[in-house]
Image (cartoon, grey):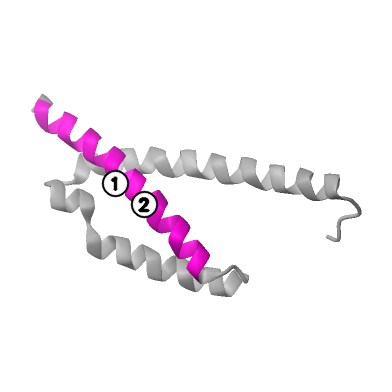
Amino acid sequence: MECQSLEEVRQHIDQIDDEIIKKIAERKFYVSQASKFKKNEQGVKAPGRVEQVIQKVRTKAETYGAPPDLVESLYRDMISKFIQMEMEEFKQQQQQQ
C-alpha cells in the first residue's frame, strides 16, 4: 500500500511495532517454558540451536525481502537476552529442587 503522508507511514509503522512486541511477548512465554526441559546450563545456552535459528531467520529474511544481516543482528541480540532470562529461570528452578 502506497502511503499518502508521513503520518500514514508512521501509523503503519506503529501498527507493525505493536504486532512485533506482541510476538516478542509470545516468544518469551515459550522461552520460559523451555527452561523447564533443560538439563544443564549448556542446554540453556544451546549454541547449536542458536545457529540453527540464525540460519533459518536469514533464509526467511531473504524470502521476505528483509536485509539478512539486519535480521541476524536483531535475532542474535534478542536470543542473547532471552538466554540470560532463561538462565535465571533455570537457576531458580535448580535451587528449588
Tell me residue 93's x, y (percent). Answer: 16, 31
Q: Is residue 17 left or right of residue 12?
A: left
Q: Is residue 4 left or right of residue 40?
A: right
Q: Nearer the viewer, residue 81 or 43?
A: 81
Residue 59 magenta: no
Which of the 4 image quadrants contains residue 53?
Answer: bottom left
Residue drawn at the location 91% of the way across and 54% of the way down: 4
Q: Nearer the viewer, residue 56 or 83?
A: 83
Report the magenta stretch's main SS: helix
How far separated are the C-alphas under marks 1 and 2? 6 Å
Residue drawn at the location 10% of the way across and 27% of the way down: 95
Q: Are marks 1 and 2 in contact (CB under 8 Å)?
A: yes
Residue 71 magenta: yes
Q: Is residue 63 above or below residue 15?
A: below
Element marked by disc 2:
helix
Disc on res. 83: 1
Tell me residue 56's x, y (percent). Answer: 42, 68
Q: Tell me which amino acid carries mark 1.
A: Ile
Please, which residue is most extreme toward the right here?
4
Q: 10 Å neighbourhood of mark 2: few (<14), some, or many (≥20)?
A: some
The residue singled out by tag 2 in the image is 79
Q: Is residue 10 above or below residue 56?
A: above
Stretch in magenta:
69-95
Q: Is residue 26 above or below residue 6?
A: above
Element marked by disc 1:
helix
Q: Quadrant of the N terminus?
A: bottom right
Q: Tell me which amino acid carries mark 2.
A: Ile
Q: Is residue 20 left or right of residue 55?
A: right
Which of the 4 image quadrants contains residue 37?
Answer: top left
